[in-house]
C-alpha cells in the first residue's frame, strides 16, 4: 500500500538556519503530495502541495519540489524563525478515490 | 466562517466502555475524515465519509465505526474500549469536489483508564 517516510526528529535549529526535512513516498501511481503543519495547541493545516512531477509548492518561505525519479518531496526553508517551531507532516493522496496517507511527522524546534 | 469543530475536547472512559466523538465540518464541506494520532505516532487513517456514505476504511478493528448525517456532521464510535485506544482523534473536512485540501479540527483527546 501507499506509505510516506519522513526523517526522524526532533530537529533543533538556531534562528536563521537552513531547514531541510526529508520525505519519501511509495505509491503505485502519481499521487498528489502535501506538507501539513501542526503548531503548538492548534490543528493541522495545509502548508503547501504539489500535484504533478516537477511542480514546486511554496508558502510562508517554505518550498518543496515533487521529484518523481527519487519519489521525494523534501521540505526546505532558507531561514527559519522561532515561530516555525511545529510538527511537520508529509502526506500523499493517490487519487480522488483514495484517502490521504500521512507520514509520522517531524518535530522542529527553532531556538532564538 | 466557523472551522471544523469537534466535541468533546477531552473524554475519559474505562476499559470496556463505549465512546462517541462528534465532528461538525466546515459549512459546505461534504467529506469528513477521521484519524487517530497516538502519542509518538503519526496520523493513522480511520474512516472517510462523503455525501453520507463510507468511502474508505483504515486498518482498524470493527469496534471502530461511524456515520455521517444528512447535514454532513459525523460521529465516530469506539466500542469495547481498550487501553491502547487512548489517543487524539482528529476530524478533517474537505469540500469533496476534487479539492484536495483538508481542514482539521483540534481533536478529541480520549483517555482510557
Image (cartoon, grey):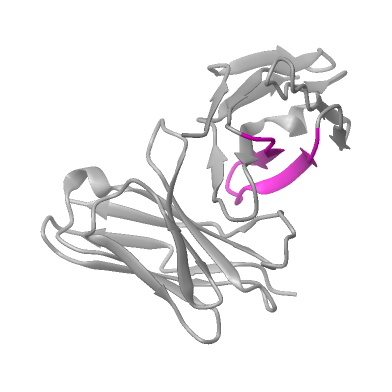
Looking at the image, residue A59 lies above or below residue B33: above
Residue in view at x 56 percent, y 51 percent: A98
Query: On the rendered structure, is B108 left or right of B81?
Result: right
Q: Is residue A42 magenta?
A: yes
Answer whether residue A12 is magenta in the image.
no
Q: Closer to the camera, B42 or A82?
A: B42
Q: How many marks?
A: 0
Q: Residue at x 54, y 66 (%)?
A: B32
Identified at 89% across, 31% down, the residue is A61
In x, y percent, where is residue A86? 64, 33
Q: Nearer the viewer, residue A109 or B84?
A: B84
Give the percent coordinates (x, y) of residue A37: 67, 39
Horizontal side of residue B67 vs B103, given as left or right: left
Task: Tell me the quadrant of the picture where the N terminus of chain B can be found.
Answer: bottom right
Report which quarter residue B81 is drawn in. bottom left
- Span highlighted in magenta in the image: A29-52
Res. B19 image quadrant: bottom left
Query: Is B14 drawn above or below residue A87 in the view shown?
Result: below
Give coordinates of residue A42: x percent, y percent: 61, 50
Q: Which residue in the rendered view is the most extreme toward the front?
A: A29
Indicate left or right for B47 with A43 as reference: left
Residue A53 vertical position relative to residue B107 in the rendered view, above or below? above
Percent position of residue B34, x then y: 46, 57
Q: Which residue is more in the foreground, A27 or A77?
A: A27
For residue A87, which quarter of the picture? top right
Residue farthest along the left direction in this orientation:
B16
| Relative height, residue A77 to residue A103 (above, below) | above
Residue at the spot 64% in from the left edge and 23% down from the top edge:
A109
In the image, A11 versus B36, the foreground residue is: B36
Amino acid at each position: 500500500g501507499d506509505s510516506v517516510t519522513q526523517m526522524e526528529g526532533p530537529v533543533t535549529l538556531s534562528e536563521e538556519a537552513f531547514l531541510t526535512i526529508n520525505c519519501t513516498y511509495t505509491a503505485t501511481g502519481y499521487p498528489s503530495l502535501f506538507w501539513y503543519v501542526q503548531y503548538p495547541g492548534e490543528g493541522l493545516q495545509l502548508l503547501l502541495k504539489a500535484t504533478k512531477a516537477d511542480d514546486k509548492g511554496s508558502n510562508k518561505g517554505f518550498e518543496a519540489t515533487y521529484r518523481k525519479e527519487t519519489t521525494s518531496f523534501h521540505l526546505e526553508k532558507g531561514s527559519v524563525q522561532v515561530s516555525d517551531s511545529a510538527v511537520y507532516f508529509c502526506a500523499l493522496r493517490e487519487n480522488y478515490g483514495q484517502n490521504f496517507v500521512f507520514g509520522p511527522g517531524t518535530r522542529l524546534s527553532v531556538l532564538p | 466562517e466557523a472551522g471544523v469543530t469537534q466535541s468533546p475536547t477531552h473524554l475519559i472512559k474505562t476499559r470496556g466502555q463505549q465512546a462517541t466523538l462528534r465532528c461538525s465540518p466546515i459549512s459546505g464541506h461534504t467529506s469528513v475524515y477521521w484519524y487517530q494520532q497516538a502519542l509518538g505516532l503519526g496520523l493513522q487513517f480511520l474512516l472517510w465519509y462523503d455525501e453520507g456514505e463510507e468511502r474508505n476504511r483504515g486498518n482498524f478493528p470493527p469496534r471502530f465505526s461511524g456515520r455521517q448525517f444528512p447535514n454532513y456532521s459525523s460521529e465516530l464510535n469506539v466500542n469495547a474500549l481498550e487501553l491502547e485506544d487512548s489517543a487524539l482523534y482528529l476530524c478533517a473536512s474537505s469540500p469533496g469536489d476534487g479539492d484536495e485540501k483538508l481542514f482539521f479540527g483540534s481533536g478529541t483527546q480520549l483517555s482510557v483508564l
